[in-house]
Amino acid sequence: MPIGGGMVHSFELPPQLTKQDKNSRKTGRVRCQWTHCDLGEILDLSLSGMRVGCRKKPAAEVGAPLSVIIDGQDDKFDVSGKVVWKKKDGLFRWMIGVEFDELSPAARKGLALLARSSLTNNTIAMQDRAKSA
């Protein structure tokens, strides 16, 4: 019981769905789920690049050109770019950042479809809410 016998009113703010840390990308970031490419699982992507989780150390070094085939909503499509960073993310896990070069119309369409499908992904929103609680 509070001091003075009065009622305590409290309210809870809705959880933030994204972290408030700096986003170093030039364009907005979309978190992905069940999206894969020939490097591994795409964790998030934007019009300028993507972050990929890999099960083994990527052979490409930082700065190296790279061609990636993405399993899109309608069909597979390829993008080219370069490795901007890579790091170990666990015992058998690596992460790699890819910056896209000039995108073809097919690649732009494929990325747009992936972004639209990720915006309605309830599982990601629920995971973010659980983490912030």
Image (cartoon, rainbow, N blue to C red):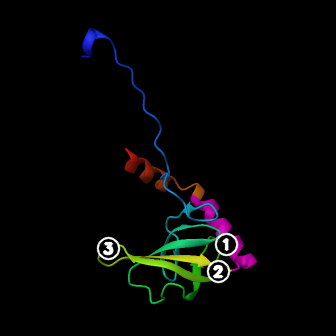
Left/right of residue 53 with respect to residue 71 in the rendered view: left
Viewer-nearest residue: 16 or 117: 16
Mark positioned earlier in the residue sequence (1 or 2): 2
**Quarter holding the C terminus?**
top left
The residue indicated by pointer 2 is 77
Instruction: Give the number of the disc on residue 110.
Output: 1
- Toward which corner of the image does residue 107 lie, by quadrant? bottom right
User: Badges 1 and 3: C-beta atoms under 8 Å apart?
Assistant: no
Q: Which mark is residue 69?
A: none
**Does the magenta portion include 79?**
no
Disc assigned to residue 90: 3
**Residue 117 appears at what percent x and percent y?**
60, 61
Give amino acid for label 2: Phe
Q: Residues within 10 Å of mark 3 (few under 14, many from 20)?
A: few
Circle nearer the N terminus (1, 3): 3
Q: Is residue 14 above or below residue 123?
A: above
